[in-house]
């Protein structure tokens, strides 16, 4: 740094003693949050997004509620199975059900989703059997489902890289000409507040913006990147970052399944019709641990948790259904019963899941088998046969 | 009767052991599938473990406080109680050991048909209840930790050593004295328990390292003790400590405490001299913010904290803990009193959450509760100062040339000389003393 550009004394002092994050003056705009269903279950009108819910009748509302409950129940059962030594690890979605079901239900069959490792609710909406997810966490498979069959990519453990995959895939859709019509297709990339700091994510934003790719960046801001709070990722609301890259950003109440459904539908519709990418920030909270290997009591206050409990994504739908007369006690009981049956099926299926055969690792290395792989497979097979003779 | 053992699973990724913090069920209890049974702390997390079986608890294999290897059985559950004669009796802990089941045995028996089996969801459970999962299912890991039960160290198995005056002949006594051996620590083998020359020689034999001397008890270093040791060593050998003392007349403070106790604002909280010491410290921090600071070696910066997170050293069943009151400076006196009451209450019950202990910026240690005058406290790591409060005693004191009886205490302040100089530290301590001697200053400087 040349002396000319050296900061004045006051700035140097400021650098040595940075102000508290809370002291930072308000940014660009007022923070706007799209909410259509209050935590108390009251439906509030919205000038832009109401039209995206025109087809949501009582039946749809009840099915959304059912999805939320079933998804949570599977998650709770999987957490228990990990504690009992049946899964190596589990990443709980507790608290994020509405963000996932709302956005998952906004997808059309021709769309393609790129998840992280926590999108169990989106997987559910895309028709992936929960047992297939558990297979991955049990170590019984390296994948678990056919991504093309479900329009739902394999879980991605590397933080944020799937945003590039989604952008590349979306650019492919555009190059195929499958965009711009009513039946156009789009991709959606899931990631978290922690991933927003990754280079990959920012690169994906640039590519998506300049190529006008039909991709929706769906950020579930659950406030925590393992033990790092949101203040360590950004000094402005995450959705406002989109402006710098040149596409719209919107913050939606991620615990509001209706708002999430509407906002994601608009973003996907825009993408499919050639309007380019949108960043959706679903503002939510990770109610559980990062994964079963994590202990959040070591780094966060229980008072925060208590405050978010009042914003539970399922309770508000239940309140709305019950108070509006859209569902009766019998319905709620039947959903709970369905959830228990599903949980029992998941448990049984997990415990009975066969271990993978040792030769399976050769099957999915290349689309077409190569000579080398075939030779390795043959050699390993012969080696395994040797044990069979010994034990015979 | 169908016995199932549950082995401690790897609760994190690649862990080899866990410590049993506490059992949530007892032998003889009837439990449901996924009912939390035990709290286990690993290197990564303290978690509640749900039961993979429904049935009756036959045996808990380890006591709270013990460290258990992953893969070793922790609980045996009878998944079909009532099937065998004699069932219903309290299980015999001395019963022959249950054969270790093969890994496949860990899988709960599942019915071949679609019919829901006993103990499974919707099926019959012991005690005539139906095993249902209430609401959305079993509890997930909560953000609450239970009090850790401290197990008393095992009584030494060595023969009881007679205390008091030991029996020995004078030459043996001299030998023991020359060798620096305490005769009372030796179990005598002579007639009537007399300590012989051979006993003294045997006691002298240099004990191989790790071999306990008679009567020694070896307590494993772990948990809070281990953490305390690490923190104290890190603090003592990183921050150059200076400790200063001030003895002052706090009669006015004692009177003020008595007056505050009668006010309705303080009806529900404890008002103690410590409350006013804390308030004085907070006011002094405002006057001298450099004391509410940290030395950041890595960044080569001194961090002046915006808020005072006031730590209170507390002797608890778990050991020494220093929970802190967040942003104590923002609290009014009743609020501060309530916060201190809650904090000590929580600590005493052993329910202090880790978050309550994180982020402290300055600490008070109240050794006065033990009747001690003062001490040279060691800084809570990362903090610049710690105030030690001694006992308040009626003491002869000179007032206007006359000796009168006054309430007097000694304050001790240790500070980190890297960032606090003697002058600053002295002013800080003198200010606190002045406010306690004359609470009007507390008001004037607030």
Image (spheres, grey):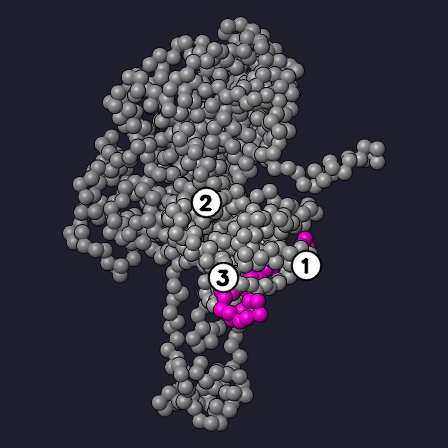
Q: Earlier in the sequence, mark 2 or mark 3?
A: 3
Q: CA distance from mark 1 to mark 3?
A: 28 Å
At 32% from the left and 35% from the top, the residue drawn is B137
Q: How many marks?
A: 3
The chain holding disc 1 is: B
Q: Nearer the viewer, mark 1 or mark 3?
A: 3
Label 1 environment density (alpha carbons within 10 Å; few <14, some 14–19, many ≥20):
some
Say which residue label 1 marks.
B422
Label 3 environment density (alpha carbons within 10 Å; few <14, some 14–19, many ≥20):
many
**Residue furthest right as drawn:** A3
Q: State the quadrant of the N terminus of chain A.
A: top right
Query: Which residues fall within the magenta stretch?
Result: B395-420
Magenta segment's dominant SS is: strand
Q: Which numbered marker is on residue B335?
A: 2
Q: State the quadrant of the C terminus of chain A.
A: top left
Does dot 1 land on a helix, a strand or a loop?
helix
Q: Nearer the viewer, mark 2 or mark 3?
A: 3
Q: Earlier in the sequence, mark 1 or mark 2?
A: 2
Say which residue label 3 marks.
B251
Q: Position of residue A267 (x, y in %)?
A: 52, 15
Q: Quadrant of residue A86?
A: top left
Is residue A92 shown to the viewer in this render?
no
Q: Position of residue A64 (x, y in %)?
A: 37, 20
The chain holding disc 2 is: B
Toward the viewer: A291 or B395?
B395
At 55% from the left and 38% from the top, the residue drawn is A228
Q: Is residue B400 rendered magenta in the image? A: yes
The answer to whether residue A82 is above or below residue B202 is above
Q: CA distance from mark 2 to mark 3?
A: 24 Å
Q: Earlier in the sequence, mark 1 or mark 3?
A: 3
Q: Is residue B46 rendered magenta in the image? A: no
């Amino acid at each position: 740094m040349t002396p000319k550009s050296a900061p004045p004394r006051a700035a140097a002092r400021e650098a040595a003693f940075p102000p508290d994050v809370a002291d930072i003056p308000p940014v660009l705009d007022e923070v706007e949050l799209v909410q259509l269903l209050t935590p108390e279950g009251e439906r509030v009108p919205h000038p832009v997004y109401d039209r995206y819910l025109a087809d949501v009748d009582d039946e749809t509302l009840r099915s959304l509620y059912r999805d939320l409950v079933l998804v949570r129940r599977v998650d709770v059962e999987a957490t228990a199975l990990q504690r009992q030594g049946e899964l190596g690890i589990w990443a709980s979605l507790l608290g994020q059900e509405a963000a996932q079901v709302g956005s998952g239900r906004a997808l059309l069959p021709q769309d393609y989703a790129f998840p992280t490792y926590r999108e169990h609710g989106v997987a559910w909406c895309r028709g992936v059997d929960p047992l297939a997810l558990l297979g991955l966490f049990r170590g019984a498979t390296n994948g678990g489902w056919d991504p093309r069959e479900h329009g739902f990519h394999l879980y991605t453990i590397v933080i944020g890289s799937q945003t590039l995959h989604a952008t590349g895939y979306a650019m492919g859709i555009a190059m195929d000409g499958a965009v711009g019509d009513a039946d156009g297709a789009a991709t959606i990339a899931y990631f978290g507040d922690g991933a927003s700091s990754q280079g990959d994510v920012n690169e994906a934003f640039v590519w998506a913006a300049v190529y006008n790719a039909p991709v929706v960046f769906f950020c579930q801001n659950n406030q925590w990147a393992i033990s790092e709070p949101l203040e360590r990722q950004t000094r402005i609301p995450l959705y406002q970052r989109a402006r710098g890259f040149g596409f719209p950003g919107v913050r939606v109440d991620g615990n509001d399944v209706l708002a999430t459904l509407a906002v994601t539908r608009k973003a996907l519709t825009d993408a499919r019709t050639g309007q380019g990418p949108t960043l959706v920030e679903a503002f939510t909270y990770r109610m559980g641990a990062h994964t079963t290997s994590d202990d959040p009591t070591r780094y966060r206050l229980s008072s925060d948790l208590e405050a978010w409990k009042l914003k539970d994504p399922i309770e508000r739908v239940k309140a709305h259904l019950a108070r509006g007369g859209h569902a009766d006690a019998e319905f709620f009981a039947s959903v709970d019963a369905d959830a228990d049956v599903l949980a029992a099926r998941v448990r049984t299926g997990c415990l009975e899941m066969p271990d993978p055969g040792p030769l399976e690792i050769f099957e999915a290395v290349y689309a077409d088998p190569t000579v080398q792989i075939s030779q390795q497979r043959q050699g390993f097979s012969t080696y395994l046969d040797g044990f069979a003779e010994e034990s015979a | 009767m169908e016995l199932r053992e549950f082995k401690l699973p790897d609760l994190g990724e690649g862990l080899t052991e866990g410590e049993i913090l506490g059992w949530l069920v007892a032998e003889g209890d009837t439990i449901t599938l996924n009912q939390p049974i035990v709290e286990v702390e690993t290197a990564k997390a303290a978690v509640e473990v749900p039961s993979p079986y429904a049935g009756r608890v036959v045996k808990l294999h380890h006591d709270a406080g013990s460290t258990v290897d992953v893969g070793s059985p922790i609980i045996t559950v009878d998944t079909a109680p009532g099937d065998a004669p004699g069932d219903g009796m309290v299980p015999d802990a001395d019963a022959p050991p249950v054969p270790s089941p093969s890994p496949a045995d860990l899988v709960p028996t599942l019915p071949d048909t679609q019919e829901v089996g006993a103990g499974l969801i919707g099926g019959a459970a012991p005690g005539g209840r139906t095993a249902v999962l209430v609401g959305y299912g079993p509890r997930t890991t909560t953000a609450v930790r239970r009090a850790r039960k401290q197990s008393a160290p095992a009584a030494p198995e060595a023969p009881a050593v007679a205390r008091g005056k030991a029996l020995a002949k004078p030459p043996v006594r001299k030998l023991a004295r020359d060798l620096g051996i305490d005769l009372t620590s030796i179990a005598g083998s002579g007639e009537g328990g007399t300590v012989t020359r051979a006993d003294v020689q045997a006691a002298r034999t240099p004990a191989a390292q790790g071999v306990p001397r008679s009567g020694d008890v070896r307590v494993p270093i772990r948990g809070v003790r281990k953490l305390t040791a690490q923190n104290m060593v890190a603090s003592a050998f990183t921050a150059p400590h200076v400790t200063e003392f001030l003895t002052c007349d706090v009669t006015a403070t004692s009177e003020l405490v008595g007056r505050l106790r009668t006010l309705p604002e303080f009806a529900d909280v404890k008002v103690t001299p410590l409350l006013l010491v804390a308030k004085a410290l907070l006011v002094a921090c405002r006057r001298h913010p450099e004391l509410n600071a940290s030395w950041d070696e890595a960044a080569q910066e001194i961090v002046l904290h915006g808020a005072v997170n006031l730590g209170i050293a507390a002797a608890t069943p778990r050991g020494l803990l220093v929970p802190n009151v967040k942003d104590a400076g923002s609290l009014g006196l009743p609020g501060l009193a309530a916060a201190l009451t809650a904090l000590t209450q929580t600590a005493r019950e052993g329910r202090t959450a880790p978050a309550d202990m994180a982020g402290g910026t300055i600490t008070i240690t109240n050794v006065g509760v033990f009747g001690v005058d003062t001490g040279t406290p060691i800084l809570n790591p990362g903090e610049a100062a710690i105030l030690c409060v001694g006992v308040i005693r009626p003491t002869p004191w000179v007032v206007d040339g006359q000796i009168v009886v006054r309430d007097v205490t000694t304050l001790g302040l240790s500070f980190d000389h890297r960032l606090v100089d003697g002058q600053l530290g002295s002013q800080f301590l003198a200010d606190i003393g002045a406010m306690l001697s004359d609470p009007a200053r507390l008001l004037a400087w607030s």
